[in-house]
Image (spheres, coloured by chain):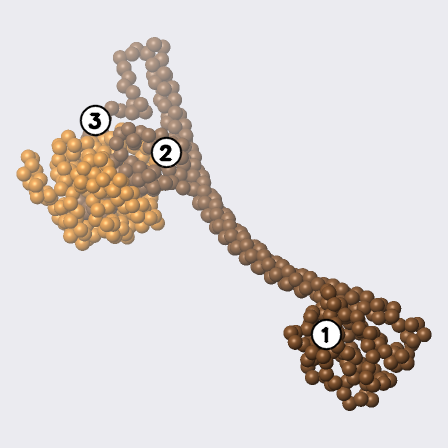
Chain colours: A brown, B orange
Amino acid sequence: MIDERTEAQASLYVLGALPLEEAREFEAAMRGDPKLRLLVKELRGTAGAMVAAFPQVAPPPALKQRVLTAIDNRPAAPSNVIALDDARGASWAGWMPWALAACFAILCVALISIGRSLREQAVALTQQLEEKSIQTAELQQQLDQLQSQADQQVTNYQTRIVELQKQVVQRIEEIQRQTAALTNQLRQQLGDTQRRMVDFRNQAEQLQREKKVLEDVVGTVASDRLASSRLSILRATADGPPGVVGASVWSPQDQRGLLVLEGIPPPPAARVYQMWLIDPAFQTPVSGGVLQVGPGGSVTLQFTTPVRVESAQRFAISVEPPGGVAAPTGKIIMASN
Amino acid sequence: MTTAIRQPVWTESLPGWRPREPVEPNPVNIQPTTTDDARLLQLIAGRDREAFSQLYDRYSGILYSTILRVLNNPDEAADVLQEVFVQIWDKAGSYDPGLGKPFNWALTLARNRAIDRLRSLRRRYSFIEEITNEMESEGRAAAAGPDEVFTQEQAALIRSAVATLPLEQRQAIEMAFLGGLTQNEIAASLNQPLGTIKARIRRGMLKLRDDLKRIL
């Protein structure tokens, strides 16, 4: 590719408008650049063609004869006839110059012929050189086109890479969002599990305490009475205090029983806890007595009933007025199944 | 057919100037090729007077018109044309086909001679007025008839291509080619930056080359 500055120089050069020094530099550059020589040749032809646009005027008719006369008066070419001195004698010294002149003439003719041949060869070689220069310029043009295509491909690949990078970033962000959501979900599940473990632990502790009170109750019953006794676990109802556990045993043969409670708070002011036995033979529960809550919320009550109870199905504890009542009137805070 | 050549008004006051007589262009000869012209130059280099006469018939009209365009004086133009053809007679052997067509070689000789003469006479064209009037007279120029170097069709194409050049590009090109001014002199004469002048000449020459590619 010839840049614009060089194109301008070439244009100015063929128009004779370059300063002398710059014209010399341009000629030096042109000698080593076939494409530049081709451009100058084209521009020189352009300048030559431009004169056809001028109004055409013929020179004076007499001028041609003046010109022909002028060239006739120019010094003869080396090939022209050489003036000979005809004052020579007929001796060998006389014909020798003629022989030499003849040889010289033959030599001149041969040289002219060789010169023409060489000139024609030079013309042919110049034409070949021009063709090669044009081919070189065409190849350079093809190379430029290929380079342009390669540049375009690179641009396309770069664009594709940028798109892929964007997609990768978007995918990473999506994965991060999903990871954060999963982490939150796992944290919630972990919290739930931990809460359930606390519940299970509490339940285990409750069962452990129930087991202990049961063992306390069972320990008070003689082994020969145990098979006919009614043994029940008491748990707090919805109105009862949380955390309290209890067990009760009733011997129909002996008509007496034992109630053991752990963790029960003191009764409300001006109220007492009262135990009840539920036997289907009676329409109302049968009182087992009023409880005395000891230190630490423990209760151990050996009780009897005012009437004979043969089949105590369930046991219950209610909140009643001081001294107790004949039939329950307050809230049931504990009951067996 | 006669061709009216406009003279810049100020040249009428120059010593030795006289109105130009309209002259007929040379009749159209056969259309020799570049190869024929190169052959003629080869013969001229061998001092072939007949070949020289043929080349004179082919080139004298267009070279004279170009020289006249530069000098604006028929006597001076005829004088320079004679010098140019004598130079062709002497230097035909130095013609290098690698540098361009024979006509372009001869045109370069003629243009350089004319510019030298112009400088020696210290005359200058009134370019702007010349270009304006040239545009007005293009119809006459086109009707002037074909010359010996370019066919009528080629000459018409060239005139059309030159006419479509922007005025400032034609102006800069003609000041260089016909006025013999350097790039700096043109810039100073037109009161324009040197870069502007270079760009105008480059664009104008490349456009002409592209427009004329099929006949060059």
Q: Which residue sits at x=68%, y=64%? A: A195
Mark 2 and mark 3 lie on one chain; the one further toward the N terminus is: 2
Q: Between marks 2 and 3, how big is the CA–CA gap?
A: 38 Å
Q: Which residue sits at x=21%, y=46%? A: B168
Q: Is residue A23 above or below residue B210?
A: above
**Badge 3 element:** loop
Q: Between marks 2 and 1, how big is the CA–CA gap?
A: 114 Å
Discs 1 and 3 carry the same chain letter: yes
Discs 2 and 1 carry the same chain letter: yes
Q: Do the numbered discs 1 and 3 sit on residues whose CB atoms are within 8 Å?
A: no
Q: Is residue A85 above or below residue B13?
A: above
Question: What is the crowding at mark 1: few (fewer than 14 residues within 10 Å), some, or many (at least 20)?
Answer: many
Q: Which residue is mark 2?
A: A30
Chain hosting mark 1 = A
Chain hosting mark 3 = A
User: Where, by quadrant of the figure, is residue A2 drawn?
Assistant: top left
- The location of residue A20, given as percent across then percent down, is 26, 29
Q: Nearer the viewer, residue A325 or B46?
A: A325
Q: Quadrant of the C terminus of chain A?
A: bottom right
Q: Which residue sits at x=72%, y=76%? A: A273
Q: Which residue is mark 1?
A: A236
Discs 2 and 3 carry the same chain letter: yes
What amino acid does circle 1 point to?
A: Ala
Q: Which residue is mark 3?
A: A73
Chain hosting mark 2 = A
User: Where, by quadrant of the figure, is residue A88 drawn?
Assistant: top left
Which is in the foreground here, disc 2 or disc 1?
Answer: 1
What amino acid does circle 2 point to?
A: Met
- The location of residue A106, given as percent across then percent down, is 38, 23
Q: Which residue sits at x=27%, y=15%? A: A85
Question: What is the crowding at mark 3: few (fewer than 14 residues within 10 Å), some, or many (at least 20)?
Answer: few
